[in-house]
Image: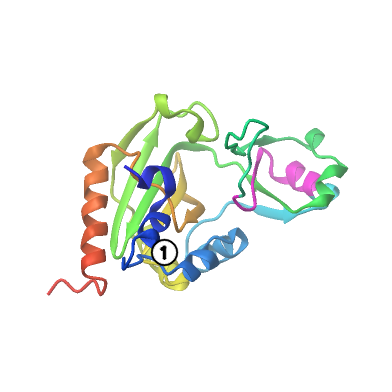
Amino acid sequence: MEEARYGLGGILGSLPGAHYLNHPWRNRDAEFKPAQLATAERCGLIVPPTVITNEPDQARRFVDDYGPVIYKPLRDTDQIDDDGRALTVWIDDVGPDQIDDRMVHTTHLFQQRVNKVADIRMTVVGDRLFPVRIDGSPGVDWRRHYEALTYTLIDAPPDVGKGVRAYVDAFGLTFGAFDFGLDAEGRWWFYECNPNGQWAWLPCSITDQITHAIADRLTNPSGDTT
């Protein structure tokens, strides 16, 4: 499916006369990760300790205080190699010895690594939530290990569902792809929300439900089922 290649909003927005699930301006606002983290916390979601900085000493202190720590891109950018192939910056562990003066040239995001037992991708379409538990990743970034993963559609705890709905309302979104880490105590740690996230790579039994929810929302943008 094309959604798996290009993301939802890009496809729908390119169709003449098509409805948007999210207005492009709402997508733009909701892609800013510092705003995501602050909004998630205000909405009652649990956010790992995080620092955004370009100062090496501050980054080293954070690693010392909160290690193990992961590094993740502050924003998605188009990166290609010399042959024109798309590149991805993977989420990975970082130690104080890896931080040097080169980081002063741009801002970086460091976050305490969640001691997770599984990952969760929750796709939100209007008032419908599709939380999927992802098991089997041998590393920090499950996107590097698709062949090892299993997917199970689960229920979200009421407090998480409430926080997620408050979050999409705060940004004026109808659609969002949320990433969480699940720890051994059952806590859902908010990582980020991609307002234009992919979903068609999930098993068909899950993808079909999301597809129907999107179709329902596009044909009835008000969400009124009466």
Q: Residue at x 48, y 35 (%)?
A: 143
Helix, strand or loop status at disc 1: helix
Q: Quadrant of residue 9?
A: bottom left
Q: Position of residue 74 (x, y in %)?
A: 65, 52
**Quick one: 17 or 69, which is closer to the camera?**
17
Q: Is residue 124 placed above or below 170 in the rendered structure? A: above
Range drawn in magenta: 59-76
Q: Is residue 200 placed above or below 82 in the rendered structure? A: below
Q: Residue at x 29, y 65 (%)?
A: 127
The residue tagged 1 is 163
Q: Position of residue 219 (x, y in %)?
A: 21, 66
Residue 187 appears in the picture as rendered: no
Report the residue that reaches farthest toward the front: 16
Amino acid type indicated by mark 1? Gly
Judged left or right of residue 22, residue 215 is: left
Residue 36 appears in the picture as rendered: yes
